[in-house]
Image: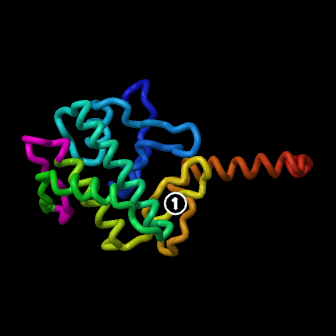
Amino acid sequence: MRAGFPDFRLGSVLATSFTGTLSERHGDAVERIPTPQRLVDWLAVYGLAVDSCSPAQLDRARELREAIHAAATAAAIQNALPAPAVHVINDRSAQGRATAILTLDGERQWHLSSASCVEDALSVIATDAISIISGERDGKLALCASPTCQAAFFDTSRSRTRKWCDMNTCGNREKKARFNANQRKNPRSAE
């Protein structure tokens, strides 16, 4: 990762990982794609390599990120999907010209056109969001139990009872806070 920027929080689901490029939404928010080049870096991590990104494209990407977050949050709590968010997701999905290709390993991979690569990459992300929000994929949208995070994530665990968007960050932080609170209540238990 580039020096001076917060690390990316990587997950296995493209759309919800993209919403994680802004974390701690209900605390001290951390912007993980503060520059166009940082978006290029994030896209490359997910196999959506683009040559460049303009400030306007970064703005469109952030608009998509927030739309996915709003729609996924509504779906997770079983509220009606917000019409403006649905419009942005559908618009970004329709704007791209990415095509799915099959690799020799039997995996799907995305091929981006050379004319508008950032728009193609955003189309792939929007399409992924549509597949999880619409219920096409096996899993469940949920919200992180961390009061400062509350990120939407796609739970594919067998029991569908995950509490944290990421156990290594939010889960550990919350467990550590509970442990420290218990230590303050019962100082002798540490001996």
User: Which region of the structure is painted magenta?
Assistant: 105-119
Residue at the extreme right of the image, as rendered: 188
Write the residue at 29% across / 66% down. Answer: 131
Relative to residue 138, is residue 47 depicted above or below? above
Relative to residue 139, is residue 59 depicted above or below? above
Residue at the extreme front of the image, as rendered: 83
- The reply, left or right, for residue 26 in relation to residue 37 is right
Q: Which amino acid lies under the numbered mark 1 shown in the image of this protein?
A: Leu
Q: On the image, numbered disc 1 is attached to which residue? A: 143
Relative to residue 41, is residue 139 depicted above or below? below
- The reply, left or right, for residue 73 in relation to residue 129 is right
Was residue 35 drawn as part of the magenta stretch in this picture? no
Write the residue at 34% across / 61% down. Answer: 83
Residues 140 and 105: in front is 140
State the SS at label 1. strand
Residue 64 at what x, y percent from top left? Answer: 31, 49
Residue 128 at what x, y percent from top left? Answer: 28, 60
Residue 155 is at least partly visible in this image? no
Give residue 16's quadrant in the image. Answer: bottom left
Residue 39 at what x, y percent from top left? Answer: 30, 37
Residue 66 is at least partly visible in this image? yes
